[in-house]
Image (spheres, helix red, strand yellow):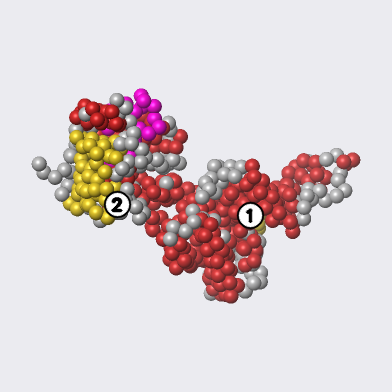
Amino acid sequence: MADPFLIGDAMTGGYGAADILHSCTIAVEKGEIAVIVGPNGAGKSTAMKAVFGMLKLREGRVMLDGEDITKLTPQARVAKGMGFVPQTHNIFPSMTVEENLEMGAFIRRDDFQDTMTQIYDLFPILKDKRNQAAGELSGGQRQQVAVGRALMTRPKVLMLDEPTAGVSPIVMDELFDRIIEIARTGISILMVEQNARQALEIADKGYVLVQGANRFTDTGKALMADPEVRRSFLGG
Amino acid sequence: MDFLNALVAFLNFVFVPGLAYGAQLALGALGVTLIYGILRFSNFAHGDTMAFGTMVTIFVTWFFQSIGLTAGFLPTALLALPFGILATAVMVLATDKVIYQFYRRQKATPTILVIVSMGVMFVMNGLVRLFIGVDDQNFADGGRFLISAGEFKAATGLAEGLSIKGSQAVTVATAALTVALLFWFLQKTRTGKSMRAFADNEDLALLSGINPDRVVQVTWIIAATLATIAGVLYGLDKSFRPFTYFQLLLPIFAAAIVGGLGSPLGAIAGGFIIAFSEVMLTYAWKKVATYVLPDSMAPDSLLQLMGTDYKFAVSFAILILVLLFLPTGLFKGKSY
């Protein structure tokens, strides 16, 4: 099989002297959804940040579409087609929804009206609230703004750090539906999730991390079926 | 009739001077609040930046006057203003390059940057005194009055006169135009929006590909422009003296904090609140009161709450009250 579209290969590194990731590998294929799950402090977000270049790697490399991007800054990776939605502080609160989307498209010099229309089609509520300050919206709507902002660059890979943190179960289901919809348009999705069970249900590929290393890697379905994964990480 | 005279006296001695002073403070506070919102520190050198810009404008004004170039009814200083702005912009950009950039790279805390800006303040203060001296400089010319008290009395037959100085009219008109342009820039242009985005959420702005160096540069240029305009208008309206500009720092910061640091709208509101408080608390209300009250209740005293020498106490008192009871200001500012 050819190399995956995006792969963080055998990544080792951390924020300071101590390593958090130990030869951790995360990959996602084109148009598929890959989910990173694991207990608190397993290094899920850190692994995602490493793939996005927000963490210095001591070993390992990151490849996007066959190109080594290990040395690139996060900004340069955005220009290469990666979109990132941080877990918190992921919107411009005092700016309107529409301005948030415009800022997402800041690096684009072409006309981005089409992309904006697509995002309004994907998240109709944003169209209704487009002149409202993003900071005044509900948690779920803010997450939609955050995802929409990241989509404005027309990324090939969308990385989501716990997109459903702090939203109600109903909103969570809806966000997952939207994420599946985004993946169907050919955008690869890599996300970290606390809600492991729901996330694995929609995942093509699941990574269970423990203490910064890969513990289990398989399709979402297979992981859900694995008795050990169920017992240890999905609460039976 | 008496009531009309009271109103005219109020307009003449309180409203018009307060409006002009408020516009000057508002422009100064806008610069402070932009630096605070985007560069994330309180720039103590702002008063002396105003002095620097005004000094350059005065030199160019004198040069224009010496070659006989004037603006007719308008003060010559308005012609010299662009040169003052340009010199000040170059000055603050150089200061940023040599000094602030170093601390930004170190990710210095806002507290350290405040102290750094105090150093810059002393240097600029010294530069200005070196070049133009410490004395009062008067550089206002053009029409002295838009409406003079004598004309007003003759036209209306009232006992009280209303005078509007040319410098007051120029101040209010220039300030209104500047603020309109600034808000258009911040709300409508791509660069202006990127500055607001940077102020809102720096990390996300970087992720969105907004160039932080450019945002910083544009912010300094705008701050220099606002400082020079505010300084020149204040100098035209009153007079230019380096020490006075250093002292203006207090009412300007009070204005920015009352409005909410980081909020441009707040800076404008704060400027007028501080200006009117200062003028109203130091004005001797005897004249107005005599017109309004019946003869039997006519006041003997001046009805002045405090002498004009104490006007800085007003800003200071308001500053303390706001910090105690409404720390984020009227328009919900930020605090770093």
Left/right of residue B160 with respect to residue A20 in the rendered view: right
Q: Which residue sits at x=64%, y=72%?
A: B134
Q: Is residue A226 left or right of residue B298?
A: left
Mark 2 and 1 residues: CB-CB less than 8 Å, in contact?
no
As shown in the figure, which amino acid type bears the numbered disc 2? Gly
Please identify the residue farthest to the left as the structure is shown.
A1
As for residue B129 lying within the magenta part, the answer is no
Is residue A151 visible to the viewer in this orientation of the structure? no
Residue labelled with disc 1: B251
Q: Residue at x 22, y 48 (%)?
A: A10
Q: Which residue is mark 2?
A: A13
Q: Are marks 2 and 1 on the same chain?
A: no
Could you say where residue B33 lies in the image, as x and y percent from the top left? 53, 52
Q: Which amino acid does the dot numbered 1 rest on?
A: Pro
Q: Quadrant location of residue A82?
A: top left
Q: Residues within 10 Å of mark 2 (few under 14, many from 20)?
A: many
Question: In the rendered structure, which segment of residues is drawn in magenta?
Answer: A158-179
Counting from the top left corner in percent of width and height, residue A97 is at 39, 37
> Left or right: where does residue B22 sit relative to residue A235?
right
- Callout in the foreground (2, 1): 2
